[in-house]
Amino acid sequence: MTPLNLVPSEPLLRADHVTLEYQGEHGTVRATEDVSFEVWRGDRFVLLGPSGCGKSTLLKAAGGFIRPQAGSLSLAGQPVTGPGPDRIVVFQEFDQLPPWKTVRDNVMFPMLAGGVRRSEADQRAGHWLGKVGLARFADAYPHTLSGGMKARVAIARALAMQPAVLLMDEPFAALDALTRRTMQEELQALWEEIGFTMLFVTHSIEEALVVGNRILLLSPHPGRVRAELNSHQFSLSSAGSQEFQAAAQRIHGLLFGQAAEPISHPSTAVQ
Ligand SMILES: Nc1ncnc2c1ncn2[C@@H]1O[C@H](COP(=O)(O)OP(=O)(O)OP(=O)(O)O)[C@@H](O)[C@H]1O
Ligand SMILES: [Mg+2]
């Protein structure tokens, strides 16, 4: 019998009027204000905005590392109250890979810490290292890898945890331009193959257009929603095209233009 393929009727991750603040030495810093968005299963949802607009802060809140001052976040209808293995974060600092562990041990480590049996963790590590093209480097140590390879290890490590949502905070920002392009392409190919859900933070308009199918534009500090866009997928080969440049310019205008007030019915297609 064919299993029922039920279409989810609720978003996987929902941010509902989220305001996030830090208590600093010089008083309260409001990082984001009244931000709402919905990430649906299979989305490549991008938070895009200038430096300091609260993108990383929103990602940390989605990860459950910090709590909103107002509003709420929920995952599959359940309030987010703390970190969990259903939300794994990939940062840009790949040197977070412990240097004394081999690539395979780095990928296995969070699974073992989460109670996965060693034989299964080993099998899953092998599988995911294969998916990111690093099967031959399973026994290598991180310092012998290039930046792009470390990024691949971080992605394999995250996906091996089988999270409901992959949270990515400018994962390719530290890479050179060419490697960054390659990684965007590889991420796209992995997504096409596996169809995972991700929330991806960037301040690069081009990266947002290449990586995302939905893009939330945030205003400068404190971050408020400027607009939400449905982006039809641009491949990297179309990145130089007129269509791509026009979409990038439109986003630039929405992000930095004078008239860019929050849009009350924000779903607009960029083509
Ligand atoms: N630990 C902290 N304590 C106090 N203020 C903080 C802290 N972390 C971030 N902030 C402030 O919150 C605001 C949002 O910071 P956040 O790091 O989320 O921005 P961002 O959009 O990720 O920027 P970037 O693109 O530079 O990474 C900034 O004004 C920042 O100074
Ligand atoms: Mg950041």
Image (tube, helix red, strand yellow):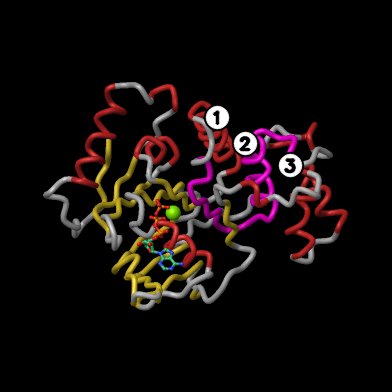
The amino acid pointed to by label 2 is: Gly
Q: Secondary structure at mark 1?
A: helix
Q: Residue at x 40, y 74 (%)?
A: 24
Q: Quarter-wise, where is residue 145 in the image?
A: top right
CA distance for labels 1 and 2: 8 Å
Q: Is residue 156 magenta?
A: yes
The amino acid pointed to by label 3 is: Pro
Q: Which mark is residue 179?
A: 1
Q: Residue at x 35, y 47 (%)?
A: 215
Q: Residue at x 16, y 45 (%)?
A: 257
The amino acid pointed to by label 1 is: Thr
Is the residue at mark 1 in contact range of ligand 1, meaning its CB lies under 8 Å from it? Answer: no
Q: Nearer the viewer, mark 3 or mark 1?
A: 3
Dot 1 or dot 2, earlier in sequence: 2
The residue beneath circle 2 is: 147
Marks 1 & 2, CB-CB < 8 Å contact: yes
**Quadrant location of the C terminus?**
top left
Q: Position of residue 110 (x, y in %)?
A: 73, 59
Q: Residues within 10 Å of mark 3 (few under 14, many from 20)?
A: many
